[in-house]
Image (cartoon, rainbow, N blue to C red):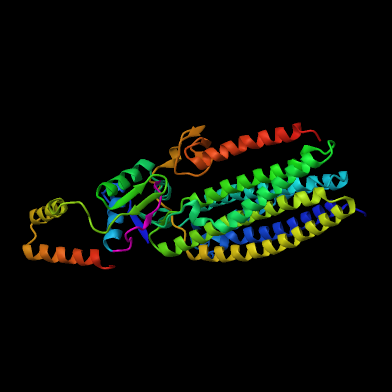
């Protein structure tokens, strides 16, 4: 079978996605028992739980992990049969989102089922909680040199693109020159919002083993911040490569594309392995800090619906008694709302540009 | 370095925050110029209303213990209550001593308690 370079890249990327998700399935499958047989996720269960009702709860949880496969396998078959392999991009994105959402809901269901067999004392919220007095501001998690390099590279490639477009013949499309870079820039802005949310994410801990809890929570926060920083760096690297790829003539352009895609694959494999190692270290730290229910001093379960005002929660959607509610109570939630609206505008503008 | 909040404590949460930060300043854990977390961070971590923490920071600011800089958070101003008269500083101690006397404690016992608490407050310095 002869496939263009981009298509080979997509097929290999999809194969890598499968390897990562199988590993993710194994990891998620082990999560309920991470702290031993006395625990089911964060619920401390009675003795013999896994020989009795826990067996069925665990089996149902494992079965729910298969839901995304039922969605994406038929979709993938349809894509391969149609030959429109670029759609694999959308399949990977949509399946990743589905896996994540399915896992969140599945854990919630499983924990709720297990709570009926929980050790009663462990279900009482701790009376005392501790909070770190170390400030968590964006600048505390930002490396100015790193940000400076990203900014210089971004601006340089945009200047080059503008120059290239102005100097090119009239038939060269603005969408081809600027479409992908605009999308990458917008993605970077989204990653920055996620980074801010990760920094602002509340992390109260019980006073019992407060140091271990704080250490685990801070390590997790730093992992996510680094993850989004390096994702932005990858996006900037693509932005830098874009002018090179579109300005090189035919054969040279194809060769550069093949080299670039090969480098992306190698970097992807290395980043995945390193990320997995770090994730395991964080999981081990989190397992050492035994989960404790914390008191809800704000009684946030009473949040309004469909719109609520919750300045302390750095998220756009909050769970209320009647379902999910729109929160516009702080700048992160407001930026997220503006970002979602802006994305629709960006797609509209890109589709209106002459092809 | 962390602050503890006890839901069974009869003191309101803002008072616990004030007392907790005061204690950390007094025992030297929070030195002069040390940055305090932003209001929003403390409110989110404790899951309390922003105004609760704003009231606590205001009380600390009025006591001259922290300096609140708009947009850049708060820092510990000084480990001494600069600008406050001795009379003003002694007033809460006098009230506490009155409570102990009314509780029927002997002078020796009160003196022992005061010395013990003083030692505890300065322990980490």
Which image quarter is the C terminus of chain A in?
top right
Q: Residue A139: where, in percent of width, then height?
A: 49, 53
Q: Residue A175: where, in percent of width, then height?
A: 77, 38
Q: Residue A248: where, in percent of width, then height?
A: 84, 51
Q: Is residue B25 left or right of residue A340?
A: left
Which of A337 and B4 lies nearest the eye of the viewer? A337
Is B36 magenta? The answer is yes
- Which residue is situated farthest in the right direction here? A1
Q: Which region shows up in magenta?
A: B28-39
Please indicate, yes or no, whether residue A56 appears anywhere in the rendered image: no
Please indicate, yes or no, whether residue A215 appears anywhere in the rendered image: yes
Which of A256 and B6 lies nearest the eye of the viewer? A256
- The residue at 74%/41% (across/down) is A178
**So how many labels did they put on this image?**
0
Q: Which quadrant would residue A27 be assigned to in this image?
A: bottom right
Is B32 magenta? The answer is yes
Q: Is residue A83 above or below residue B103?
A: above
Q: Residue A158: where, in percent of width, then height?
A: 70, 46
Which image quarter is the N terminus of chain A in?
bottom right
Which of B117 and A199 lies nearest the eye of the viewer? A199
Magenta: main secondary structure:
loop
- The residue at 39%/44% (across/down) is B70
Q: Is residue A66 left or right of residue A306?
A: right
């Amino acid at each position: 079978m002869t496939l263009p370079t981009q298509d080979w890249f997509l097929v290999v990327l999809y194969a890598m996605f499968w390897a990562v998700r199988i590993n993710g399935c194994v990891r998620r499958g082990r999560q309920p028992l991470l702290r031993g047989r006395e625990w089911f996720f964060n619920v401390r269960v009675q003795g013999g739980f896994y020989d009795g009702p826990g067996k069925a709860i665990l089996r149902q949880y494992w079965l729910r992990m298969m839901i995304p496969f039922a969605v994406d396998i038929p979709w993938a078959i349809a894509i391969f049969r149609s030959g429109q392999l670029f759609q694999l991009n959308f399949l990977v994105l949509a399946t990743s989102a589905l896996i994540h959402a399915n896992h969140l809901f599945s854990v919630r269901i499983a924990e709720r089922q297990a709570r009926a067999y929980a050790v009663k004392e462990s279900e009482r919220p701790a009376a005392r909680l501790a909070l770190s007095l170390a400030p968590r501001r964006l600048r505390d998690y930002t490396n100015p040199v790193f940000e400076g390099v990203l900014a210089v590279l971004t601006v340089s490639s945009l200047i080059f693109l503008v120059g290239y477009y102005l100097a090119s013949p009239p038939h060269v499309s603005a969408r081809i020159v600027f479409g992908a870079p605009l999308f990458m820039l917008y993605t970077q802005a989204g990653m920055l919002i996620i980074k801010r949310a990760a920094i602002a994410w509340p992390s109260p801990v019980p006073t019992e083993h407060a140091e271990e809890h704080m250490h685990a929570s801070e390590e997790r926060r730093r992992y996510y911040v680094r993850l989004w920083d390096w994702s932005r760096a990858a996006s900037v690297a693509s932005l830098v490569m874009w002018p090179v790829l579109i300005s090189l003539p035919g054969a040279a352009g194809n060769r550069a594309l093949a080299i670039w895609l090969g480098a992306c694959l190698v970097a992807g494999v290395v980043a995945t392995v390193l990320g997995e190692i770090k994730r395991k270290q964080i999981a081990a730290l989190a397992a050492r800090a035994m989960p404790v229910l914390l008191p809800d001093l704000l009684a946030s379960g009473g949040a309004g619906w469909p719109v609520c005002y919750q300045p302390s929660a750095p998220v756009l959607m909050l769970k209320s008694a009647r379902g999910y509610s729109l929160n516009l109570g702080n700048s992160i939630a407001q930026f997220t709302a503006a970002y979602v609206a802006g994305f629709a505008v960006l797609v509209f503008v890109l589709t209106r540009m002459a092809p | 370095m962390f602050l503890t909040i006890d839901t069974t404590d009869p003191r309101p949460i803002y008072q616990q925050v004030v007392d907790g930060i005061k204690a950390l300043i007094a025992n030297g854990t929070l030195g002069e110029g040390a940055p305090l977390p932003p209001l929003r961070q403390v409110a989110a971590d404790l899951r309390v209303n922003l105004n609760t923490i704003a009231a606590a920071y205001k009380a600390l600011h009025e006591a001259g213990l922290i300096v609140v800089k708009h947009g850049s958070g708060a820092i510990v101003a000084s480990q001494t209550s600069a600008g406050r008269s001795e009379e003003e500083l002694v007033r809460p101690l006098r009230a506490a001593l009155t409570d102990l006397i009314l509780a029927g404690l002997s002078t020796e016992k009160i003196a022992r308690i005061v010395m013990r608490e003083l030692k505890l407050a300065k322990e980490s310095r």
